[in-house]
Image: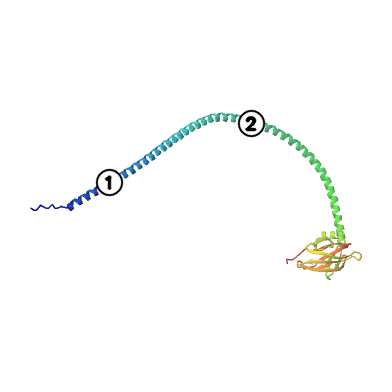
Amino acid sequence: MNEPSTQYVAPSGGSNIKIAILFGAVLALLAANVYLFLQLDHVRNDMAKDREALQSEIANLREASSVTAQTNRRTVENLRDELETARRQAAMAVGQAKTDAENKVLDLNKRLEAEQKKSAADRAAIKTEIGEVKKEAVETKEKLGAVNTEVGVVKSEVASTKSELDKTIAELKTVRGDLGVQSGLIATNGKELAALIAKGERNYFEFNLTKTKAPMKVGDIALMLKKVDQKKNRYTVEVYADDKKTEKKDKTINEPLQFYTSKARIPYELVVNEVKKDNIIGYLATPKVTVAR
């Protein structure tokens, strides 16, 4: 008799799928729980930070409100103090204004008295001055008489001087210069030169020329003394005019040395009246009318 055989039946595929789905659902649930936990913790942290910020802001607002209240209180107190001060000053000003007015009246009275005294003193001084002026007028009249006498004397002296000047001018001579041009009147001494200057026909420049290394300016020219012979009254001089040098050699006293310049149509004249050991004394005569270069 044959024994019946036992056969193993494998689980069906549908059961495995269910287990996998169930396992996946469990994992998803665990992941969701973890995510929710993390979110909850984050929310708690945010709420804690917001609470701290809110508390800090509330504290700041309280502090600002306290400061503002104190400031307003001080402002009100200051305004009250200023108002009280203003009231006191107003009361004092009224009293001071009254005092000032009274002082001003007293000052005006004093000034009026002083002006009256000064006016009286001025009138007295004017009377005294009038008396002195009258006295001075008499003295001036007397002096005027003396002055008239002196004027008469001066007029007489002027007339005498003019007569003497005319006589001196009449005695002056004219000679020919070293260029052969007829010269004007020649002065041989200081008196005659003064007469020529008074006549006013030319410009005159006196000089006392010594031996130097550089020319000496005389009028609008320059002169340099080169040689002197006192015994023979002769000299040699260099004339610098128009940037040119002209030598006047071995000349004698009272001899007109003539030279032309671009400034005049008639010649300049150099006259030496005295020859000494190391210098010569004389004058330069230039025309009154000059022309432009």
For the C terminus, the quadrant is bottom right
For the residue marked with disc 2, what is the amino acid? Asp
Mark 1 lies on residue? 30
Residue 155 position (above or below residue 139): below
Q: Quadrant of residue 182?
A: bottom right
Q: Nearer the viewer, residue 206 or 196?
A: 206
For the residue marked with disc 1, what is the amino acid? Leu
Residue 235: x and y in percent read: 87, 66
Q: Nearer the viewer, residue 14 or 194?
A: 14
Residue 40 position (above or below residue 88): below
Q: Quadrant of residue 72?
A: top left
Q: Residues within 10 Å of mark 2 (few under 14, many from 20)?
A: few
Residue 235 position (above or below residue 155): below
Residue 62 position (above or below residue 157): above
Residue at the location (70% across, 33% down)? Answer: 118
The color scheme shown is rainbow
Q: Nearer the viewer, residue 79 or 162?
A: 79
Residue at the location (30% across, 45% down)? Answer: 34
- Look at the image and tell me whether residue 260 can be seen: no
Residue 58: x and y in percent read: 39, 37
Mark 2 lies on residue? 107
